[in-house]
């Protein structure tokens, strides 16, 4: 009898007590059980997608079709690691038809994957390898601003926006070189993570557009790669019109460019209402930024070459074009061998910053253009530059309109012909 009582007591202890206490598992189930609803739908779907589940049970959540679509859209637009998940999927509903049409809730989701199994493992490894290689130069820069500037400029130069290609994932963009805004924003996020700069994706579903936010110092800023794309046929030309803007500045520039953006709200994870950087004139630059020490940024604005020190927040003028034969100088900067080159309208400007030898990479020191003897050491005081001019144009009807670097490491100058205004 006592043994029977002990058995009954154990039964109550192990089976009834958890029910009475309302105990629940703290791990999301993968079989769609009732415990799954203890976690947000986004977390549940993310876990299922990472495991490439063939069918995802949704019964515990009773979501609407819109909730499923919105959750999936956010996951694919805000997480680069889901590059293998296709935006197409299938929903299944209760076959008994007991739900009213207006209250129908999908019972399962069948995703579509670009890669699975061994192919997915290879794709993940390849994507990670390509991201590391692409971001490697930026990782040598000391300033987060210089890292962000490098990634922005290189992506604008290397990739082309192609709405007809329907490429929305970062892996395909990295391999094929073209895609839509979502692919750009996801790839930038992956690259920013690689260089340890806080970043996020921003989505505006009403206008089907995506861009990024980055943190510089204590403040967050907007950065829109695809809206900074340019069709100007001048090598090295990179607009920065949508580079590091506050919420208010971005809204104003969007509305000025397209009135349908007036008053439009977007889904951003951070408020970008800190210090404006417009006084640095970064957004007025239409050429790629250049740096030698990985911190000081050089850039061209109108007829001037400026240098920004992020540490002090000071901007100084390095060179100004006098008596330009053209209204727009179209200057572009290129870093090569520890020097910065810039095309003036009628000559090539070479800037040699005074930097410590330790700030230069081995590649800089071992190019034919630079040796250790060429690099003076800092002995204190602000950086100074020496400027020299070369390659003057002999034809006064031509002017230099762009500068770029060939794959072989050669400077390439582009020219345009002056023309007389019609009478």
Image (tube, grey):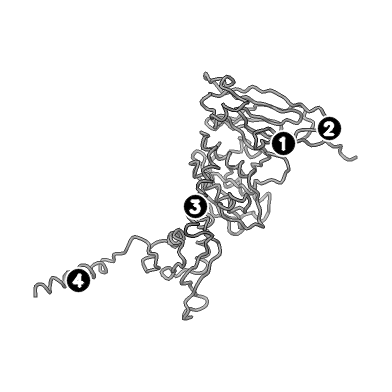
- Which x, y percent locates residue 32? 40, 68
Label 3 crowding class (10 Å Cα cut-off): few <14, some 14-19, many 20+? some
Q: Which residue is mark 1?
A: 402
Answer left or right for 167 relative to 231.
left
Comparing 355 with 299, the one in front is 355
Whole-number angstrom distance, CA of label 4 to CA of label 3: 48 Å
- Earlier residue among tags 2 and 3: 3
Comparing 15 with 339, the one in front is 339
Residue 397 numbered tag: 2
- Earlier residue among tags 2 and 4: 4
Label 4 crowding class (10 Å Cα cut-off): few <14, some 14-19, many 20+? few
Whole-number angstrom distance, CA of label 1 to CA of label 4: 83 Å
Question: What is the total number of numbered labels drawn onto the structure image?
Answer: 4
- Which x, y percent locates residue 78? 52, 54
- Which x, y percent locates residue 154? 61, 41
User: Which residue lies most toward the left here?
Assistant: 1
Q: Quadrant of residue 324?
A: top right
Q: Nearer the viewer, mark 2 or mark 3?
A: 3
Q: Which residue is mark 4?
A: 11
Q: Give the vertical position of 306 relative to 163 (above or below).
A: above
Whole-number angstrom distance, CA of label 2 to CA of label 4: 98 Å
Label 1 crowding class (10 Å Cα cut-off): few <14, some 14-19, many 20+? many
Whole-number angstrom distance, CA of label 2 to CA of label 3: 53 Å
Indicate the quadrant containing the N terminus: top left, top right, bottom left or bottom right: bottom left
> Tags 1 and 2 in contact by the CB under 8 Å rule?
no
Q: Which residue is mark 3?
A: 124
- Earlier residue among tags 3 and 1: 3
């Amino acid at each position: 009898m006592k043994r029977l009582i002990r058995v009954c007591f154990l039964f109550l202890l192990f089976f009834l007590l958890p029910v009475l206490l309302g105990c629940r598992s703290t791990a999301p189930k993968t079989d769609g059980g009732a415990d799954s609803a203890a976690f947000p739908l986004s977390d549940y779907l993310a876990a299922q997608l990472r495991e490439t589940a063939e069918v995802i049970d949704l019964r515990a959540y009773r979501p609407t079709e819109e909730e499923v679509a919105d959750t999936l859209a956010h996951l694919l637009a805000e997480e680069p690691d889901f590059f293998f998940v296709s935006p197409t999927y299938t929903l299944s509903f209760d076959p008994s038809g007991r739900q009213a049409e207006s209250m129908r809730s999908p019972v399962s989701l069948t995703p579509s994957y670009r890669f699975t199994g061994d192919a997915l493992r290879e794709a993940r490894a390849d994507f990670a390898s390509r991201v590391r290689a692409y971001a490697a130069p930026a990782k040598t820069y000391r300033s987060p601003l210089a890292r962000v500037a490098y990634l922005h400029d290189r992506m604008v130069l290397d990739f082309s926006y192609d709405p007809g290609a329907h490429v929305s994932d970062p892996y395909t963009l990295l391999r094929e070189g073209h895609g839509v805004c979502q692919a750009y924003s996801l790839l930038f996020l992956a690259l920013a993570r690689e260089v340890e700069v806080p970043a996020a994706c921003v989505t505006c579903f009403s206008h089907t557009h995506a861009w990024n936010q980055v943190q510089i110092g204590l403040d967050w800023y907007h950065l829109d790669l695809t809206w900074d794309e340019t069709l100007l046929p001048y090598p090295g030309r990179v607009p920065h019109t949508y580079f590091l803007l506050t919420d208010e500045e971005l809204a104003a520039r969007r509305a000025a460019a397209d009135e349908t953006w007036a008053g439009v709200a977007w889904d951003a994870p951070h408020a970008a209402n800190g210090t404006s950087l417009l006084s640095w004139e970064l957004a007025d630059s239409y050429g790629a930024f250049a740096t030698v020490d990985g911190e000081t940024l050089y850039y061209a604005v109108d007829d001037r070459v400026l240098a920004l020190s992020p540490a002090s927040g000071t901007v100084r003028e390095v060179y100004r074009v006098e008596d330009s034969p053209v209204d727009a100088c179209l200057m572009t900067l290129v870093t090569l061998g520890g020097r910065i080159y810039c095309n003036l309208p009628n000559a090539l400007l070479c800037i040699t910053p005074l930097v410590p030898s330790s700030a230069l990479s081995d590649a800089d020191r071992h190019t034919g253009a630079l040796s250790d003897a060429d690099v003076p050491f800092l002995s204190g005081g602000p950086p100074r530059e020496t400027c020299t001019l070369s390659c003057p144009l002999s034809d006064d009807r031509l002017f230099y309109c762009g500068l770029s670097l060939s794959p072989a490491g050669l400077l390439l100058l582009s020219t345009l012909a002056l023309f007389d205004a019609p009478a």
